């Protein structure tokens, strides 16, 4: 696992997010889950609530992200087409696509929505019918996997869990590196140090969550053990038996 610092996307920033997610705010829970799941596979997702701080200009921040992100994911739901803001983001993405003469726009279909007019001739990733297969396909595409191999593996592989998604991506060449926000990692270190100072074990923080998320935190624990070798608090907190 690699710990990286996600710098704020300023005018002078060299950061180029892999994926910007354009969506209606009414679909925030759906999009937050999608962004979190994609992030688990090392993809730098630009999501407004993760990036925009109090005092920032919404228009400038989103416009800059659309220009700098490698791909623009359009989260198509029945609510998307009703939003003028979403339409403006779509038009900006189409304008950049025409200017750079390459595919940038990725239509992502949710909630059995109808394709958007004037891009309805494009191939959509249909998350409505199979979320996990579409997730694997999207991640593989962002990682520039061979299109024929993507099609073959997504069709053949039995993708029923996030672990299946991980296995398919590794077969397509993903190196297994997960990116973790630097601030998140520093916070975990701070909490761990406080627990050590107080000389007690923290209870399990990952109660009632999916096994995939547990594995993600376990990897964080393994990274923390590099800085706090054989620490019993880390092992207890992350369920590590080594």
Image (cartoon, rainbow, N blue to C red):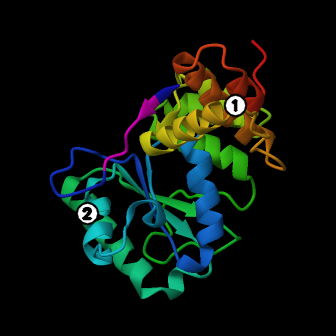
Report the disc number at residue 148.
Answer: none
Q: Position of residue 222 (x, y in %)?
A: 62, 22
Residue at point 44%, 44% (across, down) = 183
Magenta-drawn stretch contains 131: no
Q: Position of residue 125 (x, y in %)?
A: 59, 55
- List the residue tagged with mark 2: 64
Q: Is residue 31 above or below residue 4?
A: below
Highlighted range, magenta? 3-7
Under circle 2, the secondary element is helix
Cα–Cα gap, marks 1 and 2: 47 Å
Of the pair 169 and 42, the residue shown nearer to us: 42
Where the C terminus falls, by quadrant? Answer: top right
Q: Position of residue 43 (x, y in %)?
A: 48, 41
Q: Are marks 1 and 2 in contact (CB under 8 Å)?
A: no
* For marks 1 and 2 on the same chain, the one whose residue lies earlier in the sequence: 2
Q: Is residue 37 above or below residue 177?
A: below
């Amino acid at each position: 696992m690699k710990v990286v610092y996600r710098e704020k996307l300023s005018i002078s920033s060299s950061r180029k997010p892999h994926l910007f997610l354009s969506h209606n705010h009414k679909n925030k829970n759906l999009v937050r889950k999608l962004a979190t799941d994609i992030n688990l596979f090392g993809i730098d997702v630009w999501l407004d609530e993760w990036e925009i701080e109090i005092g920032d200009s919404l228009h400038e921040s989103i416009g800059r992200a659309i220009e700098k992100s490698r791909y623009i994911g359009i989260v198509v739901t029945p609510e998307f087409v009703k939003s003028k803001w979403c339409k403006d983001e779509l038009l900006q993405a189409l304008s950049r696509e025409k200017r750079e003469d390459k595919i940038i726009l990725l239509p992502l279909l949710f909630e059995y929505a109808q394709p958007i007019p004037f891009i309805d001739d494009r191939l959509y990733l249909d998350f409505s019918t199979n979320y996990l297969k579409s997730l694997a396909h999207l991640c593989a595409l962002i990682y520039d996997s061979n299109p024929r191999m993507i099609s073959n593996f997504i069709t053949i592989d039995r993708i029923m869990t996030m672990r299946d998604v991980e296995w398919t991506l590794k077969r397509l060449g993903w190196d297994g590196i997960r990116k973790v926000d630097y601030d998140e990692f520093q916070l975990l270190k701070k909490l761990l140090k406080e627990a050590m100072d107080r000389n007690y074990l923290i209870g399990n923080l990952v109660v009632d969550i999916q096994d995939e998320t547990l594995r993600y935190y376990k990897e964080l624990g393994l990274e923390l053990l590099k800085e706090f070798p054989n620490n019993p608090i880390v092992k207890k907190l992350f369920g590590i038996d080594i």
